[in-house]
């Protein structure tokens, strides 16, 4: 397992299973496993809406987390780091 400590999120990347386990986003703790396609979809959405005045991320379709425009940029950087860990 490889630890990822980004600006907005942190978690563990499992090279064997090729999945990322999200452990925290901002100051909220969670355990959510994301595959490569899910990370790519989130990155793609955020890139398309980067000019918007922030975004809201949902955990478990219940907890809403507001991200400022600057936090969205930081999250995109974190996701780019995670995307580079996936392998075919």
Image: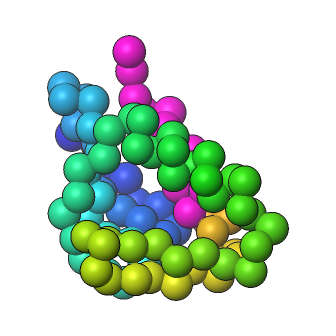
> Where in the figure is residue 9, as x and y percent of width and height?
42, 65
Is 47 above or below relative to 88? Answer: below
> Where in the figure is residue 6, as x and y percent of width and height?
47, 61
Q: Which quarter of the rendering shows the C terminus?
A: top left
For the record, the magenta segment spans 75-88
In the picture, residue 48 is in which quadrant?
Answer: bottom right
Is 66 above or below relative to 49? Answer: below
**Colour setting:** rainbow
Taking the spot 44% from the left edge, 82% from the top edge, the residue there is: 65
Q: Is residue 8 magenta?
A: no
> Where in the figure is residue 77, as x and y percent of width and height?
61, 54
Name, please, the residue furthest toward the top.
Answer: 88
Task: Please give left or right for residue 36 compared with residue 42 in the image.
Answer: left
Task: Please give left or right for residue 87 compared with residue 56 in the image.
Answer: left
Taking the spot 25% from the left edge, 76% from the top edge, the residue there is: 29
Answer yes or no: is residue 88 visible: yes
Task: Please give left or right for residue 73 compared with residue 66 in the image.
Answer: right
In the picture, residue 16 is in which quadrant?
Answer: top left
Taking the spot 42% from the left edge, 35% from the top edge, the residue there is: 37
Which secondary structure type mostly characterizes the magenta part of the structure? helix
Q: Nearer the viewer, residue 1 or 58?
A: 58
Is 57 above or below relative to 75? Answer: below
Q: Is residue 84 magenta?
A: yes
Taking the spot 51% from the left edge, 52% from the top edge, the residue there is: 42
Answer yes or no: is residue 82 visible: no
Q: Nearer the viewer, residue 52 or 27?
A: 52
Q: Which quarter of the rendering shows the N terminus?
A: top left
């Amino acid at each position: 397992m490889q630890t990822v400590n980004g600006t907005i999120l942190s978690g563990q990347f499992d090279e064997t299973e090729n999945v990322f386990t999200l452990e925290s986003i901002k100051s909220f703790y969670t355990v959510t496993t994301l595959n490569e396609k899910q990370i790519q979809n989130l990155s793609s959405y955020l890139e398309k809406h980067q000019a918007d005045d922030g975004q809201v991320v949902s955990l478990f379709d219940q907890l809403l987390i507001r991200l400022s425009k600057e936090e969205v940029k930081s999250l995109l950087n974190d996701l780019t780091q995670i995307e580079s860990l996936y392998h075919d």
